[in-house]
Amino acid sequence: MLRMSTLFLRTLREDPADAEVPSHRLLVRAGYVRRVAPGIYTWLPLGVRVLERVARVVRQEMDRMGGQEVLFPALLPREAYEKSGRWTEYGDNLFRLKDRKGGDYLLGPTHEEMFTTLVKGEYSSYKDLPVVLYQVQTKYRDEARPRAGVLRGREFVMKDSYSFDLDDEGLRVSYAKHRDAYIRTFDRLGMDYRIVAAVSGAMGGSASEEFLAVSPTGEDTFVSCTSCDYAANTEAVQVGAAAAQDPADHPAMQVLDTPDTPTIATLVADLRGKGHDVGPERTLKNVVVKLRHPDGRIEPLVVGVPGDREIDLKRLEANVSPAEVLPFEAADFASTPALVKGYIGPQVLADAKIRFLVDPLVVPGSAWVTGANEPGKHAVNVVSGRDFTPVGTVPAAEVRDGDPCPRCGSGLRIDRGIEIGHIFQLGRKYTDAFSLDVLGREGKPVRVTMGSYGIGVSRAVAAIAEQAHDDKGLVWPRSVSPVDVHVVRVGKFDTEGVAERIATELEERGLEVLLDDRGGSPGVAFKDAELLGVPTILVVGKALADGLVELRDRAAGTSRTLPVEEAVAAVLAEVRG
Ligand code: ATP
Ligand code: MG
């Protein structure tokens, strides 16, 4: 039994200064976690219990779907990551370190290399497959923006699993089993989540979906169709673009003086005065950024989006990964005379050897108003495929509420979410890098195909808190609450140790119990109980004079009184449902 009188816990009345989101504020105030450094947290006794409960649900569902648990070290030698290319590809996010002999090591950000090597060492025949291995383990990533407490840590707990199959059909089955296991897991964790299509990115591979906990504080945005079941991370949306046009349908390009037109709106008004009636959606906004490639190479990149939309840098970055997107600064403009700030047009980019990509909304053959690469001048009737030729397309324009669904054409709605899980048909990227073959049925070697699947276990604690709280504190779903019941003894009324007796009996009946035995002010005890967020609270106080106790439901905010002899049965009924 946990006793408040001795529990290592100090609740705080004030919000921590650095906390922007509710889960961070409440997990600190209620004494679940404490900050050590940016993105690095200590779990206190109640926090450990919630983390363990989440991990237990994850393990049970992984075991149920046939996964087998292993445990890798976090400290790993360079070689395997060198072989896969990720020693460099992971960029600044990878924690690298040296041992006393000068050997290179890293702190594992995810373990595809290690699992592939492990399976290669142990297995050699088609009869051994399929196999699913998983671990619940501490991961390290030197995130650029650690955020919101344990929501985005630099050290965090992940369940990562890997499936190994003989062929694509096998991979599809392993993927489907993971998907079902994740649905069961997040249902049991009491979360409100959506499964959305994700960008597979440079990892290659085909199907990839994310599980997003719906939350206004989430860093991801996703769309869902208002009439069909299409749902996707905005990074992965391909907004239905219009059909290609014939470049010959447009008049010749013409350069115009457009002084004092610093914004799209002023430009549109100026052109209308000159007899060119084009809306902002027919202007081409050319945004210049720098790409940093995994090998360190830096390259300017110009991206064209319709002028009535912002560029979505996160969407762009997801689609050029593993390259990173950096701002193009004043010094960069100074050293690149071809790019005239404010008047960039794609007409000159090919000659300047600067790559130009367009959002798919900029269809081949379409005509645009855009910069004329000279201060104070714009060009009209600049036609894609005639006056400039993009080297390719990249989804980079902001996706907006009401945009057409790529599947059915109805309106999309946009919401925010927290990525709590990711399932991914990885394919043969790692089995190729490590030559993982098994002997097939016909006696010939077969290249194994892989899936990789993650759940953010520590992040899930924060995501649950983000969804389950009110202005008084946390409101844990039963499955992850640090204890099953919080018994509050109000000392001046309970002089005979009734609360103690009930708590002991509940524990004997198999419940995990927190007893507030401090005997101080009832107001403080009630405030703490609300802050800690155990869903069932039993108060042994004033009503005891009439032989009654009070059973509170934290989530509903309701309470009822019942005879003291019925307390144990009532709590058991609440907890066991
Ligand atoms: P994100 O887009 O949020 O950075 P990711 O795509 O890098 O996540 P994966 O590599 O797919 O994440 O990792 C699997 C899971 O691990 C994620 O779905 C997420 O729940 C969790 N996770 C990833 N990064 C962190 C982090 N910095 N802190 C806590 N959990 C994380
Ligand atoms: Mg992901």
Image (tube, rainbow, N blue to C red):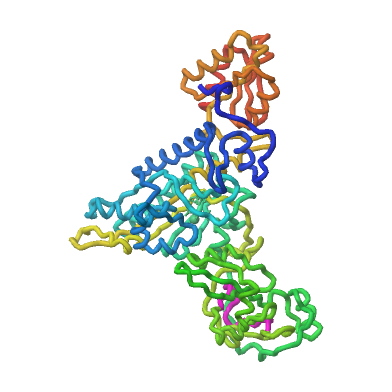
**Does residue 62 appear anywhere in the picture?**
yes
Q: Name the residue located 57 percent from the left edge and 50 percent from the top edge.
A: 418
Q: Quadrant of residue 167?
A: bottom left
Where is residue 266 shown, x and y percent of the image?
A: 78, 76
Which residue in the rendered view is the most extreme toward the left? 443
Where is residue 40 shown, x and y percent of the image?
A: 53, 45
Q: Name the residue located 49 percent from the left edge and 23 percent from the top edge.
A: 511
Q: Is residue 181 above or below residue 168?
A: above
Q: Verify whether residue 535 appears in magenta.
A: no
Q: Verify whether residue 368 appears in magenta.
A: yes
Where is residue 524 shown, x and y percent of the image?
A: 68, 24
Q: Is residue 437 left or right of residue 176?
A: left
Q: Is residue 351 left or right of residue 519?
A: left
Q: Is residue 185 above or below residue 550?
A: below
In the image, the segment drawn in magenta is 356-371
Is 405 in front, or is 434? 434
Q: Name the residue located 53 percent from the left edge and 63 percent from the top edge.
A: 318
Q: Name the residue located 59 percent from the left edge and 72 percent from the top edge.
A: 289
Which residue in the rendered view is the most extreme toward the front? 100
**Does residue 66 appear anywhere in the picture?**
no
Q: How many marks?
A: 0
Q: Is residue 351 above or below residue 559?
A: below
Is 344 in front, or is 394? 344
Where is residue 276 shown, x and y percent of the image?
A: 75, 84
